[in-house]
Structure formats: C-alpha cells, structure tokens
Image (cartoon, helix red, strand yellow):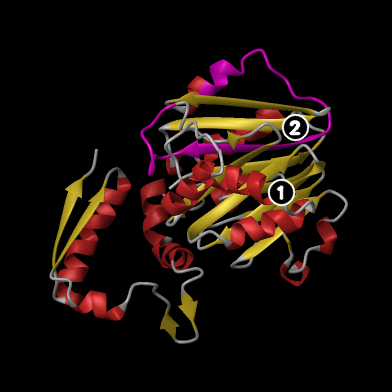
Amino acid sequence: MCGIVGYIGDSEKKSILLEGLKELEYRGYDSAGLAVLSNDRLEVFKTQGKLENLKSELKNKEFLNFGVSIAHTRWATHGKPSSANAHPHFTENLALVHNGIIENYASLKKELESKGHAFLSQTDTEVIAHLLEETLKSESDLLKAFEKSISLLKGSYAILMLHKRAKESLFYAKSSSPLIVGKGKEGVFFASSLSVLVPKVDQFVILEENSVGRISLENFKDLKNIENMKDYAFEDKDYSKGNFRNYLEKEIYEQHSSLLECLEGRLEALSVYCEIDPEFLENVNEITLCSCGSSYHASLASVYLFERLAKIRTRAILAS
C-alpha cells in the first residue's frame, strides 16, 4: 500500500505535497519522493526512510511558479526500501508515481530490456515509465501513447504521470486502487484519500474504475465523468475525531464504510468480482496472511472469519 498526491497550480508546491504525504504517511513509510515540472525543468527528489528525510532534503527548495507536481510515500512491495526503488520513477522526459501491483511487470521488463531499456530499480513501477517511452516511438500523441501503455498492464494501479511535452497537465489511470481528483481556489489536486483534499477543494470526484485521462486547469470541467462531480463544503470535523473520544473509536465505527471502499471495483450486481479461478480455490487447504502494523490485527480477525466461514485452516504471520 502506498500514498500518492498530485497538484497543478501556481502555489508553492513543496508545502502542498509534503502536507499531503503527511496525511498519507500511514499508507507507507519505507521511502518518499516528489517531482515538479515548472519552467521547462523537471526535478525529482527521493529519500529512503520516513517523510522527515525528504523534508530535510528539500529544506532549501521552493517551487513558486506555475507547474505540475506529483509525490509518493511507499511501503515496499517489489524491491527493497531504498532511494533507487522510491517513487517517482523517471526518464529524461517524464516522471510517475504508482500505487498498486503490476502483475505482469516481469514479462514487460524482459521485453523492454531486449529493446535496449536499462532499469535502475527493482520495482514494478519503473516498467510503466519505460513502457511509455517505448510506446512514444510509434505513437506521437501523448495521451494515446499513455492509454496504450496502460492497456498493457495487468494488476491494480493508481498512476499519476507528468511529461515535459505537457507542461500544464497530469495524466492519470485508475484500476482497483483509490484515486480522487478535486478543484479548489489554488488549482487541481489528486490524492489516494479524500482526507488530503480537506480543505483545499470545493469540488471533487472519485475517479471511475478503469478510467484513463489527462487533466489540466483548463480542461477540468471537460472530464468524461463530470456528472459524478460533487460540490462539498468541507469542515474540519469531517476528518478529525469529531464526536468520538479517540481515533480508535472513530475507526471502529467506520468499519462499514472502510469495507465498502475495500470492495470498490470488485462489485458486480449482486456478486463480488474476484479474478482468482474458482477451481484454484477449491484446492486451497491452508491460507497464510503476512502483514504488519494495523494490517496484522486485521489479519488476526481474518483468521477467525476464514476458518469459521470458509472452513480453511488459516494463520497470520508478523511480516516485519
């Protein structure tokens, strides 16, 4: 699980991105990074460890002019925690961040390496950057090339990408991973969680499943799914403890909505969509859940449910 933030506008970008990452730090704390494209210059900063390390790296930096920017906090899935494996991943012309898992990254990487691409990290995400560069050799239209590259991916993803040829836009793709976009007085904002957008926007939309596109300040109102745009007057109590005594109590009462968010993109009519072959499930006789932090406690609860409802022996292992 990772957290991503994006911003288009002329406000100071470092503070906006770092504030957003701070709100998402619970989604990953192995590494953090950001990229800013402004005045024809692409700058990328990445550090291993907690967000404070990135703050120190950017201590004397400011990004005051109009530009587009993305940021990411990571919990390692493919590749160990390191600066090289931290997001954003980039080439000479683009940078991107990704939350999710690309299941066919190994075969894509092998094909790209055969075409001369050299990889600097162990991550599945870097494959997306090189895939887009390769696609642009035969498709000059940037959005079409991005769409074609995304169509080759298998897995779950929320992706934000910026490119030197589109200095006022961010490109996005979403499949089985949360991504929200909103607009406020300071510009356009993206995030993995609605809490990041408080109180920056007065309009937002949870991007539809399998949506791919390009957004700038000018075309924001031309989104294909604009009918889902919501006006909202945010109040601090919406994302604070509210009337609850503490965050633990608040999260207990939010379990219903959290479960619905977890199932987003996997509900079809009256059934839950699952890509696992039913025949494969019939042959499963034991389940092992590897997790840490609060996810470990969720795994302990799942052990009880799996064994009681599915009648399958299950165990939870502390991963780190």
User: Of 139 and 23, which appears nearest the observer?
Assistant: 139
- Residue 136, compared with residue 263, is above or below; it is above
Q: Is residue 242 above or below residue 319?
A: below
Q: Residue 295 location in percent, x, y?
A: 31, 50
**Callout 2: SS:** strand
Q: Label 2: few (<14), some or many (≥20) within 10 Å? A: many
Q: In the image, residue 277 lies at what x, y percent?
A: 32, 76
* Residue at point 42%, 54% (across, down): 250
**Mark nearer the N terminus (2 vs 1):** 2
Residue assigned mark 2:
37
Query: Disc 1 residue type?
Result: Leu
The C terminus sits in image quarter: top left
Q: Position of residue 208 (x, y in %)?
A: 63, 67
In space, the residues marked 2 and 1 are separated at their CA atoms by 19 Å
The residue that appears at 46% across and 65% down in the rendered structure is 257
- The local secondary structure at tag 1 comes to loop
In percent of the image, x 68 and y 45: which residue is there? 199
The amino acid type found where label 2 is placed reads Leu
**Magenta region, residue range:** 54-82
Q: Position of residue 229 (x, y in %)?
A: 74, 65
For label 1, count other residues whose C-alpha is less than 10 Å away and answer few (under 14), some (14-19) or many (20+).
some
Q: Please tell me which residue lies in front, 163 or 130.
A: 130
Foreground disc of the pair 2, 1: 1
Q: Which residue extends farthest top?
A: 60
Q: Which residue is mark 1?
A: 136
Does any portion of residue 93 appear in the rendered image?
Answer: yes
User: Is 62 within the magenta?
Assistant: yes
**Left or right, residue 141 beside residue 204:** right
The answer to which quarter of the image holds residue 287 is bottom left
Q: Is residue 22 left or right of residue 198?
A: left
Number of residue marks:
2
Classify residue 91 by image quadrant.
top right
